[in-house]
Amino acid sequence: VELLKEKIRLEGKVLSDMVLKVDSFINHQVDPVLVMEIGKAFAKAFEDEHITKVLTIESSGIQFAMGTALALGVPFVYAKKKKAITQSSDLYSASVESFTRNETYQITLSKQFLTPNDRVLIVDDFLATGAALVGLIGMIRESGAALAGAGIVIEKSFQEGRKLIEDAGVRICSLARIASMSPGEIHFIEELKTSSVK
Ligand code: 5GP
């Protein structure tokens, strides 16, 4: 998805060696054209996997799960960070340490929405430490559903998440892989060329 890398180059702001701000098109204001392109790219990457459900975690994964689910013609479901009183008590849960917020929170998912008959594709906006994905993978394993893989919009390949998830035997498709970054520049993995950013 060339548009994604273009947007990262033009609008991404590297706040530190570890944190990329993309809130003008990914996770605060959202570019719906980009979301749909990303959804189609994930649907194509996993087209032979007979996916029955897309799984993400609120809140920034939701739009990408929606785009992917629409392209695949299946439902998507998102793990919640706060338990609602309307939620059933029959839940999968996992604790996740947040990379950007520096806190640990409990994610939950009603058991009725993930069953052993499902083939699941996880979708998320970022892969950093892998903590969010580990939480989701735990829920899938507990449910008895099959895990087809994970579609990641932006992977910070210099953090430990990719290796952790691959070592768990999960196939990853990342649309933008950042090898390294520092304020003013971003190096993507495929091309290994420096891009100027604000
Ligand atoms: P992980 O669990 O892999 O450490 O991080 C997952 C979540 O942290 C992502 O879904 C994303 O919301 C957030 N995150 C991680 N790194 C970044 C970053 O560099 N920028 C932004 N905006 N969010 C990030």
Image (cartoon, rainbow, N blue to C red):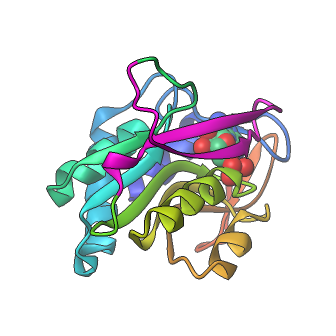
* Range covered by the magenta-colored residues: 86-114
Q: Position of residue 144 (x, y in %)?
A: 43, 70
How many numbered marks appear? 0
For the C terminus, the image quarter is top right
Residue at horizontal 50 percent and vertical 31 percent from the top: 59
Q: Position of residue 2 (x, y in %)?
A: 41, 57
- Which residue is nearer to you in this view: 33 or 11? 33
Q: Position of residue 62 (x, y in %)?
A: 40, 37
Q: Quadrant of residue 122?
A: bottom left
- Which residue is nearer to you in this view: 137 or 124? 137
* In this view, 133 is above or below 87: below
Is 6 magenta? The answer is no
Q: Is residue 174 visible?
A: no
Q: Is residue 170 visible?
A: yes
Q: Is residue 1 left or right of residue 33?
A: right
For the N terminus, the image quarter is bottom left
Q: Position of residue 127 (x, y in %)?
A: 63, 55
Is 111 magenta? The answer is yes
Q: Residue furthest left?
A: 73
* In this view, 78 is above or below 119: above
Q: Is residue 130 left or right of residue 160?
A: left
* In this view, 14 is above or below 51: above
- Which residue is nearer to you in this view: 4 or 75? 75
Residue at horizontal 52 percent and vertical 31 percent from the top: 27
Q: Residue furthest front?
A: 89
* In this view, 125 is above or below 136: above
Q: Quadrant of ligand 1?
A: top right
Residue at horizontal 32 percent and vertical 48 percent from the top: 113
Residue at horizontal 34 percent and vertical 55 percent from the top: 54
